Amino acid sequence: MNSHRIGNTSAFWLDDTSSLKEAARLSAQVKQDADFGPDPFKQSTIDDCLEQVVQSKNKKELSGDDDYYWNTSAHVAFNFDDVDDDGRRNVQFNKRAQSSANNVRKFSFDESNRVTAEACGVTLPSPGSNLRQAGLGDVHKHAERLRIGHDVPAKGLKSTNTPEETVRNIVIGQPYFLGQHRSKEDKIALLNEAVRIQDGNAIIAVLLFLKQTLKQSLFNQELMQRPRAVSHYLSHLRAVQDNSQLMDVLGMLGKAEDAAMIKYKLAVETPEAATRLRNLQSCYKSHFQSDPSLETQAELVREELKLLEMQLTIEEQDSRAEMEGQNILMQEFPRKAPVVGTSLITTLYYCCLYHYNVSNNHIASPSQMKAMFNLTEKQFVWTALTALAQIKHWKEIDNLFQGKSWLGKSKMRCCIGFDKAVEILAKAHAPPEVFERYLQMVDDSEKRLTLAKAHKCHSVVIEQQETSEG
């Protein structure tokens, strides 16, 4: 009997068309005011059912009888007296609809999810990020946590994750606790999973954890068995400038030259000269002296050590001589900078400038330097000529070019060519008689005439033209 009443009640509401229309109209107005989008997952309500019934019944009535539509329509004729009232109603309606829409737009499902996540102690990635951005920041944070011993589980995070779940949390930027994995098997499983996923940050985080919790020999053994982990670890060591560990790993990999170059770079970058010398000596003994494969590099390091030792001695002596006024050239041509740290050719130029006439056993003798470092004749002559022309020692330049022929007679010779020597003398503003004398020694007549015209040596130009005409 109850079911019969319910059936009658339903039929009663379906027959009451005006009530159904009013309910549907109110439902549509509320939906329009709120500006809700379609929700395919919402449950059907009585308003939706009523609206569907009214719409279907209206369609039948419109298709069946047009007179019925016009007789029962809610539309009324236009009345000019109602314009003001309608305008006020429309303004009020629009304001109410806009306010409702704004209130709806302020609500964000992402915010509700984030609030729920924060209540559970879980950090969600930002909407604009791809889960997280890879960088050294994550690795540095983990390294700092390991260093200060605060690698503890976050609030609300379970401490029974498998190694695979822990690595997954690292990759997606979720809280993780590596300290829960205490057995050797779990630690190796962490490394294997990180290498399998090929995530650099995960690999580095696990390696730093293993380095803190495993014996050094076991850590090195597991690391060497995984080339991809080694590659990421080397990049991390270079980024954080852990040069000691970097050289150890390179040594284990058999890359002696790379390890030696890192040690050499650290030595030569030392600002203080005496400390730089000691570091270079240590680098030479530990990496270059005992490795036959680095003999070429070892020879270069030996020469650099000799040069630095020589420069330190010369600088010490010249600084004292300059203060006491013992070197006249230093008073006439003051030193602009210390000789320590300069190149070999610059050091030779310095010695030719201030110590050209010293004995061969003197530490600053240019001749001794030429023999010690196996400089070529052209290197020596070019550098010495430039230095002697700078201090206007023309007599010494004559002696520099003085040679002997096969018969024992003296003859002027220049291994770099007298045309190059003339250019150097011109830059040093040599006296006209000196310049003209060396210009006459240029063998090529065309070059001689060109140089004479360029430097306005008129006597040589006239002589050359008379010779060509005759």
Image (spheres, helix red, strand yellow):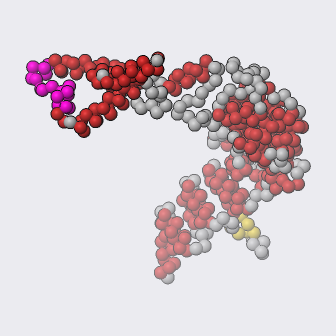
Q: Confirm whether residue 314 shows in the render.
A: no
Residue 240 percent across, percent down from the top left:
71, 35
76 in the magenta segment: yes
Does residue 186 sit above or below 111 in this rendering? below
Residue 408 percent across, percent down from the top left:
78, 72
Magenta part of the protein: which range?
A: 68-84
Which residue is drawn at the image coordinates 83% and 51% (left, top)? Answer: 298
Tell which of 57 and 6 is nearer to you.
6
Q: In the figure, is residue 57 to the left or right of 407?
A: left
Does residue 466 sit above or below 235 in this rendering? below
452 in the magenta segment: no
In the rendered image, the residue lying farthest to the front is 1
Q: How many marks?
A: 0
Which residue is drawn at the image coordinates 68% and 55% (left, top)? Answer: 383
Which residue is drawn at the image coordinates 34% and 25% (left, top)? Answer: 14
Tell which of 31 and 469 is nearer to you.
31
Residue 353 percent across, percent down from the top left:
68, 48
Residue 431 percent across, percent down from the top left:
56, 56
Q: In the figure, is residue 214 to the left or right of 264?
A: right
* Residue 283 lies in quadrant: top right
Does residue 359 sit above or below 82 in this rendering? below
Q: Confirm whether residue 228 shows in the render.
A: yes
In the rendered image, the residue lying farthest to the left is 80
